[in-house]
């Protein structure tokens, strides 16, 4: 995701379809999602990014939200930081 953006681009969607396939194939897996913002876009945008990913996995792939966990958003102050949602299986 680019700075100040919370929508999914084609590359993001393709990656999430792969994650969705993995979650579908392995019902016992759970996914943690942590929005990461840069100093340019702050915590509120990080939270929106996490929600966009959650909504995509639930609506587009049918993953139960009971298997999707969010964590507190963080800000990456590194000058070269990229806006993202960190995923952990």
Image (cartoon, grey):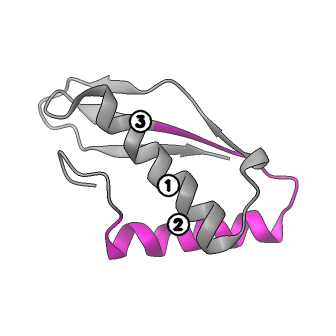
Q: Secondary structure at mark 2?
A: helix
Nearest the viewer among 44 and 19 is 44
Q: Earlier in the sequence, mark 2 or mark 3?
A: 2
Please report contact status of discs 1 and 2: CB closer than 8 Å, yes or no. yes
Vertical order, 28 against 76 (above or below): below
Q: Secondary structure at mark 3?
A: helix
Could you tell me residue 3's position as x and y percent? 17, 46
Could you tell me residue 37's position as x and y percent? 29, 34
Does 56 sit left or right of 80 as displayed?
right
Please report contact status of discs 2 and 3: CB closer than 8 Å, yes or no. no
* Mark 3 nearby-residue class (10 Å; few <14, some 14–19, many ≥20): many
Tell me the number on the disc at residue 53. Answer: 1
Nearer the camera: disc 2 or disc 3: 3
Stretch of the chain drawn in magenta: 8-34
Label 2 sits on residue: 16
Mark count: 3
Nearest the viewer among 49 and 83 is 49
* Mark 1 nearby-residue class (10 Å; few <14, some 14–19, many ≥20): many
Could you tell me residue 72's position as x and y percent? 50, 23
Q: Quadrant of residue 77?
A: top left
Vertical order, 6 against 57 (above or below): above
Q: Quadrant of residue 47?
A: top left
Label 3 sits on residue: 47
Does 37 sit left or right of 71 as displayed?
left
Q: Secondary structure at mark 1?
A: helix
Vertical order, 41 against 84 (above or below): above
Q: Is residue 10 magenta?
A: yes
Residue drawn at the location 15% of the way across and 37% of the way down: 80
Residue drawn at the location 71% of the way across and 67% of the way down: 22
Tell me the number on the disc at residue 1. Answer: none
Tell me the CA gap for discs 1 and 3: 10 Å
Q: Earlier in the sequence, mark 1 or mark 3?
A: 3
């Amino acid at each position: 995701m680019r700075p100040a953006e919370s929508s999914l681009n084609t590359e993001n969607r393709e990656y999430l379809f792969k994650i969705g396939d993995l979650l579908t194939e392995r019902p016992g897996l759970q996914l943690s999602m942590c929005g990461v913002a840069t100093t340019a876009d702050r915590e509120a945008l990080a939270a929106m990014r996490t929600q966009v990913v959650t909504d995509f996995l639930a609506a587009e792939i049918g993953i139960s939200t009971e298997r999707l966990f969010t964590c507190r958003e963080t800000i990456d102050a590194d000058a070269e930081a990229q806006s993202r949602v960190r995923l952990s299986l």
